[in-house]
């Protein structure tokens, strides 16, 4: 079911703009290849405790894995279309899956049984639990005469949505939503669009609260950190951007030379992980080296790339990092999920702080100057005798 291999975290060939920041040169990431899917991976997520990993692909069958060793614990059968998104509740009791078959299904994580089915008017692109673990929000694509919609559901009432928010056409063109989240304390519903725009809606009234133009092209995915104070975007315009998720202020931009399909924020280090690669339609004629299918590591503050992890033979479509920061997973167009465990040298590595080093260097120079000034003058006998 799985094969074990070793993947090196390589230093990038481009020198770092911050000379004091050491690149990762010899660190190892122990990797397991999880080969339970037959088609391209679309989404992967850890549960809140980090001991389980959930994955979905275009083969219609989500899987649950043990993150410690990559053992597959079970599968969820019932969908008839691609699984575009999934989300597990805080206590790992229930799993939600959003599918192109125009349904969202509620599953028991313990038994794999389908508990309920929530029918939509079009293919469902995203799903996300609210923090009360009772409500959840979905986004569905336009279908026939229906526009794209945001729907809020109660898991106890699958027959009818609590709230529906219509996403009308812009300049005569239909808009597709790509990602959906609840912000901190369920204050707003966050939605990203295929036109590079991010929107915040009121879950009570359905009114548009804020709109942010983040990218020039499609936003492929948005990820929040655990306390939902930061959000990072991934775009087809070759960039990923970090936002303050409280005031929605742009903080940093991470530039690449390929489309970015997913990005995650480390919970334990000031690191950003980016995944993407060449367009899937050209993958069959491109080697892994040329297609640039590796996971790229950036420093969160300095915006500098300092390492890569290779292993996939197609564009990386999904990334997830364990809440404990000890491992991360990547899923790609090749149909494989790779589970990467960081070794002790990476986990113990501390990122230098340039400001602190500058202050330390200046203080040493000042101490040296003071010692030179306090040094007594040598006694010159010839001058004394004269």
Image: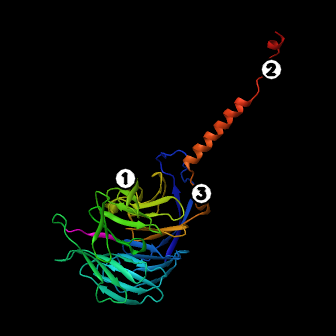
Comparing 121 with 161, the one in front is 161
Residue 344: x %, y % from top left: 61, 63
* Residue in the picture at 32% in, 63% down: 219
Comparing 262 with 147, the one in front is 147
Tag 1 and tag 3, C-beta contact below 8 Å: no
**Mark in the foreground, 1 or 3:** 3
Element marked by disc 2: loop
Q: Is residue 148 left or right of residue 129?
A: left
Q: Which numbered circle lies on residue 349?
A: 3
Image quadrant occupied by the C terminus: top right
Q: Quadrant of residue 63?
A: bottom left
Residue 150: x %, y % from top left: 28, 76
* Residue in the picture at 20% in, 77% down: 143
Q: CA distance from mark 1 to mark 3?
A: 28 Å
Mark 3 crowdedness (10 Å alpha carbons): few <14, some 14-19, many ≥20: few
Q: CA distance from mark 3 to mark 2?
A: 52 Å
Residue 315: x %, y % from top left: 38, 63
Sequence-wise, the earlier of marks 3 and 2 is 3
Query: Which residues fall within the magenta stretch?
Result: 174-179
Element marked by disc 3: loop
Comparing 290 with 183, the one in front is 183
Sequence-wise, the earlier of marks 1 and 3 is 1
In the displayed structure, 289 sits above or below 148; it is above
Question: Is 270 a magenta residue?
Answer: no
Q: Which numbered circle lies on residue 257?
A: 1
Evaluate whether residue 291 shows in this view: no
Q: Which numbered circle lies on residue 379?
A: 2
Residue 231: x %, y % from top left: 41, 64
* Residue in the picture at 38% in, 73% down: 187
Comparing 386 with 312, the one in front is 386
């Amino acid at each position: 079911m799985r094969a074990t291999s070793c993947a090196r975290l390589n230093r990038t060939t481009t020198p770092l703009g911050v000379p004091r920041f050491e690149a990762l040169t010899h660190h190892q990431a122990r990797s397991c290849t999880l080969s339970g899917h037959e088609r391209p991976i679309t989404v992967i997520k850890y549960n809140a405790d980090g001991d389980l990993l959930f994955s979905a692909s275009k083969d219609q069958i989500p899987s649950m894995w043990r993150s410690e060793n990559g053992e597959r614990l079970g599968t969820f059968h019932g969908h008839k279309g691609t699984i575009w998104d999934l989300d597990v509740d805080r206590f790992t009791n229930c799993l939600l899956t959003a599918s192109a078959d125009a349904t969202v299904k509620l599953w028991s994580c313990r038994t794999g049984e389908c508990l309920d089915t929530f029918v939509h008017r079009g293919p469902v692109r995203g799903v996300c639990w609210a923090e009360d673990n009772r409500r959840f929000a979905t986004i569905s694509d336009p279908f026939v005469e229906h526009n794209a919609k945001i729907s809020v559901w109660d898991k106890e009432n699958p027959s009818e949505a609590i709230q529906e928010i219509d996403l009308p056409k812009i300049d005569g063109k239909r808009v597709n939503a790509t990602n959906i989240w609840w912000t901190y304390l369920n204050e707003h519903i966050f939605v990203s669009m295929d036109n590079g725009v991010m929107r915040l809606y009121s879950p009570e009234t359905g009114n548009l609260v804020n709109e942010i133009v983040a990218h020039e092209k499609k936003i492929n995915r948005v990820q929040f950190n655990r306390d939902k104070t930061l959000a990072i975007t991934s775009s087809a315009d070759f960039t990923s951007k970090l936002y303050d998720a409280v005031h929605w202020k742009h903080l940093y931009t991470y530039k690449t030379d390929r489309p970015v399909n997913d990005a995650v924020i480390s919970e334990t280090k000031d690191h950003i992980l980016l995944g993407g690669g060449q367009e899937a339609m050209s993958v069959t004629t491109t080697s892994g080296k040329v297609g640039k299918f590796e996971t790229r590591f950036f420093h969160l503050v300095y915006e500098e790339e300092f390492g890569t992890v290779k292993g996939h033979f197609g564009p990386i479509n999904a990334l997830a990092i364990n809440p404990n920061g000890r491992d991360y997973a990547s899923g790609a167009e090749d149909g494989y999920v790779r589970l990467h465990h960081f070794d002790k040298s990476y986990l113990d590595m501390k990122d230098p702080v340039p400001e602190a080093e500058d202050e330390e260097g200046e203080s040493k120079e000042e101490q040296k100057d003071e010692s030179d000034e306090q040094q007594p003058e040598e006694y010159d006998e010839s001058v004394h005798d004269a």
